Amino acid sequence: MSEWVLLLGGSTGHGAATAKRLAKDGYGVIAFHFDRGEAKKIAEETINEVNEISGGRCHYFNTNAASEDAMQSFIPKIKEITAGSKLKLLLHSIAFGTTTNFFGDKPVTQRQMDMTVHVMGNSLLYWTQNLLNEELLGDGSRIIGLTSEGNYLAMEGYGPVSVAKVAMEAVIRQIGWELGQFGITANSVQAGVTPTRALTKINDRWEDWVENTKKRNPMRRTTTPEDVAGTISMLLKSEANFINCSIIYCDGGEHRSGTI
Ligand SMILES: NC(=O)c1ccc[n+]([C@@H]2O[C@H](COP(=O)([O-])OP(=O)(O)OC[C@H]3O[C@@H](n4cnc5c(N)ncnc54)[C@H](O)[C@@H]3O)[C@@H](O)[C@H]2O)c1
């Protein structure tokens, strides 16, 4: 099997689980991550594991994938790696933004808003444009981004990310609408609350959040990165060729259950 996937944010959480799952499925993995200090050690463990599962068909780049420079300088490398084959998947699984309220002690600034919406939302559009121009996307390619309940609920500290999620969903809908004619589909996967590194940074009460989620989730547990990886693996199958411009929920029904 010669197909490759490109993961933006592939070292921890949902992106890491997806890298491992897709490597098991037989895909070669190209991934970006942006890790320093302790996070870098966790990233190294993921990279070693993906490398082993994929038999060495694994390339990780530790850099800010949302910068224009990264897109310009890494796309030739990606072309070299894929050697003429299209990418099966472009996944956006980046968690990097300002988690603060709009008002109060630390009101969000315009710079923080712009950065969060760019990195967690609009950057997916620019990646898609560049990859399409370089003929790295084609019939059967998937664009997937991870969204959350925060796209329609207001939550403590989540405002800027909430705005980014709404932007990303709109970007995805429009990509699927414009590129569907070429057999390229774009969908959002809405994950339920998942105890990952990103969750611990949203607010100090994240542990209460996890406990409350377990109670309100119809399946009485939180989402795992492996649940999300399984959903993405399923969406790569040819049976999913006609799923486009949609939001797929991977949360045990959490989005149907009221907050408690
Ligand atoms: N954890 C949840 O409860 C939850 C729920 C729904 C959706 N999501 C979404 O899932 C996605 C992944 O989050 P996670 O929970 O797995 O978090 P995580 O912190 O475990 O993973 C984030 C990944 O993004 C990478 N990253 C961060 N900034 C980057 C940058 N500028 N360039 C390249 N890579 C960068 C990190 O290196 C890491 O690989 C996010 O978009 C998040 O909003 C998370």
Image (cartoon, rainbow, N blue to C red):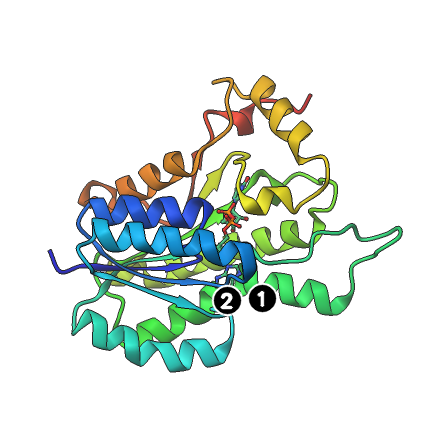
Residue tagged 1? 118
Q: Is residue 85 left or right of residue 253?
A: left
Give above or below for 176 relative to 226.
below
User: Cα distance, mark 1 to mark 2?
Assistant: 5 Å
Q: Residues within 10 Å of mark 1 (few under 14, many from 20)?
A: many
Note whether ligand 1 is within 8 Å of mark 1: no
The quadrant holding residue 260 is top right
Name which residue lies at 45% across and 71% down: 126
In the rendered image, residue 197, in percent from the top left (x then y), is placed at 55, 45
Element on which disc 1 rests: helix
Name which residue lies at 72% across and 35% down: 205
- In contact (CB < 8 Å): disc 1 and disc 2: yes
Element on which disc 2 rests: helix
Q: Is residue 162 left or right of residue 238?
A: right
Amino acid carrying label 1: it is His
Residue tagged 2? 123
Is residue 28 shown to the viewer in this render? yes
Is residue 188 shown to the viewer in this render? no
In the rendered image, residue 144, in percent from the top left (x then y), is placed at 39, 52
